[in-house]
Image (cartoon, rainbow, N blue to C red):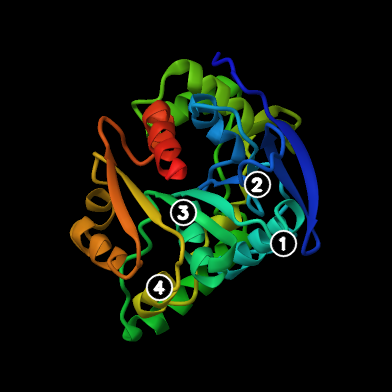
Amino acid sequence: MYQALRPSRSEFVPVRNLRYHVRLWGEPSPARPPLVLLHGWMDVAASWQFVVDALAEARWVLAPDWRGFGLTDGGGVDNYWMPDYLADLDWLLDHYAGDTPIDLVGHSMGGNIAMQYSGVRPQRVRRLVNLEGFGMAPLRADEAPARFGKWIDQLKRLHRGEMGLATYPEAGGVARRLMKTNPRLTQDKADWLAAHWSVARRQPDGREAWEILGDPAHKIINANLFRVDETLALYACIAAPLLAVEAADDSLGRWWKGGYTLADYHERLKTVPDTRIACVEDAGHMLHHDQPARVAALIDAFLAG
């Protein structure tokens, strides 16, 4: 199994009636701002371990488990909303950073949150790194009726127990699932991640099974349409320099089949006042697992400015 070079510790912080789990590496230093890492959908804070280990120097790093992921409870809700993540992050920064601007890195959903938050609170972000946080394909207003209906239908399916997550007889099954999803993931990293992405729990039939640490309610679509104009308005307010990092594998091409492309994403990025784009070769969407040393080197160089 992978051996962490810089072990983390856990803290629980009260955030908006939730007990938020935060993973921390290193200690605060007046010489450097906090480095805050935001994980993606169906991921956990521990997923950043490989990148933290590859950073050139030890520094104070914070990574929360988003509500309903990892060791952070979801509060009993049956769906999740982007504005909640923005508010949760603001609460966490009040606790850990106060008025000190932070260096902010987000992957996938975490990258989208980092981008939006940097537009909402530009004074709180010194440097911004977005790893494959592309946003969503544009939706038309006339799609709203069907989308609201789909949202309601999915809520009903969730409450009937039809949208649960798969369970596994042992942690090795979780590791194999991670490697099937990401063929570049090595066995040692998959075994390490499986121990942090899942937990063994007694099932109603008495058997023990490993469950993914993610609330099935995250599978419910957002009822509201994604608005490109709102996204661009947020991007335009970002004051921090932005490094947008992409994997050489074209995730957007695979997901959207031409409905939303890298060229479309690059056009949106032109709204951010200070942007540069980097590409990581031999990597897919989980580039922080595929090439952690390369990702860490990009972050190090960019944050050094």
Mark closer to the observer (3, 1): 3
The residue that disc 4 covers is 231
Viewer-nearest residue: 187 or 46: 46
SS for dot 4: helix
Q: CA distance from mark 4 to mark 1?
A: 22 Å
Q: CA distance from mark 3 to mark 1?
A: 19 Å
Disc on the earlier residue, 3 or 4:
3
Disc on the earlier residue, 3 or 2:
2
Q: CA distance from mark 2 to mark 4?
A: 24 Å
Mark closer to the observer (2, 1): 1
Look at the image and tell me whether residue 202 can be seen. no
The residue that disc 1 covers is 91
* Identity, as a three-letter code, of the amino acid under mark 1: Trp
Disc on the earlier residue, 2 or 1:
2
The residue that disc 2 covers is 64
The residue that disc 3 covers is 128
* Identity, as a three-letter code, of the amino acid under mark 3: Leu
* Identity, as a three-letter code, of the amino acid under mark 2: Pro
Mark closer to the observer (3, 2): 3
Packing grade of label 3 (10 A; few <14, some 14-19, many >=20) is many
